[in-house]
Amino acid sequence: MEVKLWNDKREREMYENFAELFAIIKATEKLEKAYIRDVIAPSDYETECLKLIAHFKTLSSSLKDTVPSIESFADTYKMDCRAALNRLVTSGVPATVEHRSAAASSSTNSAATVAECVQNFITSMDSLKLNMVAVDQVYPLLSDLSTSLNKLSLLPPDFEGKTKMKEWLGRLSKMGASDELTEQQARQLHFDLESSYNSFMAALPHAGN
């Protein structure tokens, strides 16, 4: 006899999201241990950690009704991942960013803003994948991303991400709050976000960090 884990599409999505949350916590725990043991370069650690934190924030926000406590979720599924919970829930930034807090204020602000930009990029892309395409869902995410990009002095005024986000915000401001992006528009926006994100990551080594 076949045993079903779910009764409908909504339950299936919930369990798939649970599985993804489980995977993010496990991956973060492995990454933290690799960083502590010095088997991963700090720059590689920071890049991967920023991605995991951003994915975690998007997913935990969408699951807040079914998973009000991440710690309880970890207990339920017998996850011994204290380092991951500290990084994802308590800290919210990579260890490398925390460690730089003892450095000059300007470089700390820069590191924190870089982290903020990466998280805003990934949150925006993740939201489109979750089919959050209404103007009142998309606009605040792109606005936050645009604000964080403009705070980062190492990016030129004509940086691709800045100009593209400005164009999209202008386009969205002419639409109604409940209007939704067409499939073609959502696909183009995701492409622009991904392209801008890649350009952003490529620009970082030239920041003199």
Image (tube, rainbow, N blue to C red):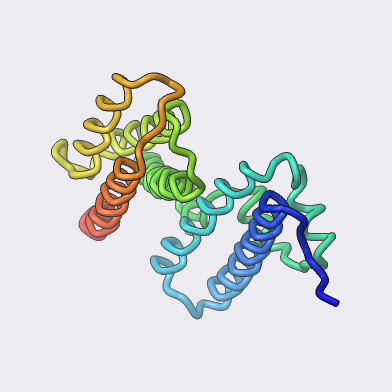
**Residue 160 relative to residue 46: left or right:** left
- Residue at 27% from the left image edge and 52% from the top image edge: 200
The residue at the far left in this view is 158
Compared with residue 184, is residue 75 higher up or lower down, i.e. above or below?
A: below
x and y percentages locating residue 12 in the rendered image: 69, 57
The residue at the far front in this view is 1
**Residue 39 relative to residue 191: left or right:** right
The quarter of the rendered structure image containing the C terminus is: bottom left
- Residue at 25% from the left image edge and 53% from the top image edge: 195
Occupied quadrant, residue 206: bottom left
Compared with residue 104, is residue 8 higher up or lower down, i.e. above or below?
A: below
The answer, for residue 208, to whether it is visible in the render is: no
- Residue at 41% from the left image edge and 48% from the top image edge: 125
Q: Between 114 and 72, which is closer to the camera in this rendering?
A: 72
Compared with residue 35, is residue 139 higher up or lower down, i.e. above or below?
A: above
x and y percentages locating residue 54 in the rendered image: 50, 51
Q: Between 108 and 166, which is closer to the camera in this rendering?
A: 166
x and y percentages locating residue 19 in the rendered image: 67, 63
**Residue 145 relative to residue 50: left or right:** left
- Residue at 75% from the left image edge and 47% from the top image edge: 67
**Residue 67 relative to residue 175: left or right:** right
